[in-house]
Image: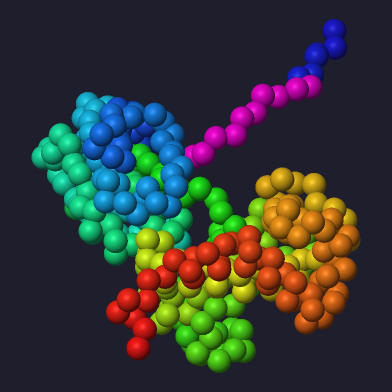
Amino acid sequence: MTEEKNTWRFSESRPIRPFKISEHALVSTGFRTRDDIDFSTQNPWHLTVEPEEIENETFHPSFDLTVDRDSLSSETGIGLCDLDLSLIVTSPASHISECFEKWRIEDFPDQYSMNYQALRNLSCRRGYRFSLIVSPNRPLDTAFRTASSPGQVVASRTFDVTITESGSGFPVELADPESFVEHMGLPKETVWVIQWLTESDFDRPVEDVLCVYLNREEGEKILRLSNRDAVGNAFWREIATEVFVEICLNLFKKETDPPLDPDGLLYKMTHKLSTESGLDFDGLISKSEDGTKGAGFFRAHLQKGLELGDRIKKINLAGRAQ
């Protein structure tokens, strides 16, 4: 009798964590962005708002801090007295995170509201990520699959508030002045520069195609410019216009096939400029090959699309003009 061979196998892919975490400790925690709405425990938690809403004083992030202490202790193997709950706020625009509060798990408020003015220290240009993090509050004895160091995350919950996408959205990072000299061969006084992450495939999400590096000496101040300030709003749109002019000249000179991916940078730029100028994809390619006239064409239509002129008209010169 011939022995049958096993010709198939089961397999699965899942993350293997170095220590135990609690998946349930924070699921009942609620969050809201204004005082006149109810707390929501939706998971994942994500809300997209208009720029004016996140810049208004009615934007008042609050938490209903509900922690399942039994699940936390049993699922992590750590005593409650050895754990802290921290509130971390991240600004995606400036890639800066700040710890606003830290409590002992045995002693935190039932509800907590953030100070509006404190948030102003972080750029809100692309929204905020609010993270609740549970980690050991002191070094613990080492045990198998058990966290033992402060900073090791044993439970977490994030709440994302993002800004509606506009024509001025692109990835931004800060760079030290010396890095422009050492890594890019540019003067340290450079204010911004585009780093291209690909040489040919532009029909992809913008974060896969490029990143705009701001000089840290000016960038931290630029990123804090408020959309509610007329000068700051116009300044950002002028930067966005010049960034997109360079993007257009690069994209349309190197691409010959019409874009297909609605989430891709090339598709979005083509749609935006076709809407504003009336030219199709081939027409935009021709303009990119037209030297300084092409640059002027893209700049003018981008200024129109980003409403730069309207924003400049809204600037109140009282107290500014000399």
Is residue 4 in view? yes
Q: How many marks?
A: 0
Task: Please provide percent x and percent y for residue 155.
Answer: 33, 39
Question: Which x, y percent locates residue 86?
Answer: 24, 48
Quick check: can you spot residue 147?
Answer: no
Which stretch appears magenta?
7-17
Residue 285 found in image quarter: bottom right
What's the magenta bit mostly, secondary-structure-wise?
loop
Q: Residue at x 41, y 31 (%)?
A: 43
Residue 282 belongs to magenta span: no
Between 28 and 276, the one lying in front of the other is 276
Q: Is residue 62 above or below residue 115?
A: above
Colouring used for the render: rainbow
- Left or right: residue 291 compared with residue 74: right
Estimate the x, y position of residue 21 in percent, counting from the top left: 35, 37
- Which image quadrant: the N terminus? top right
* Quarter residue 36 falls in: top left
- Residue found at the far left of this picture: 107
Rendered residue at 82%/58% (across/down): 279
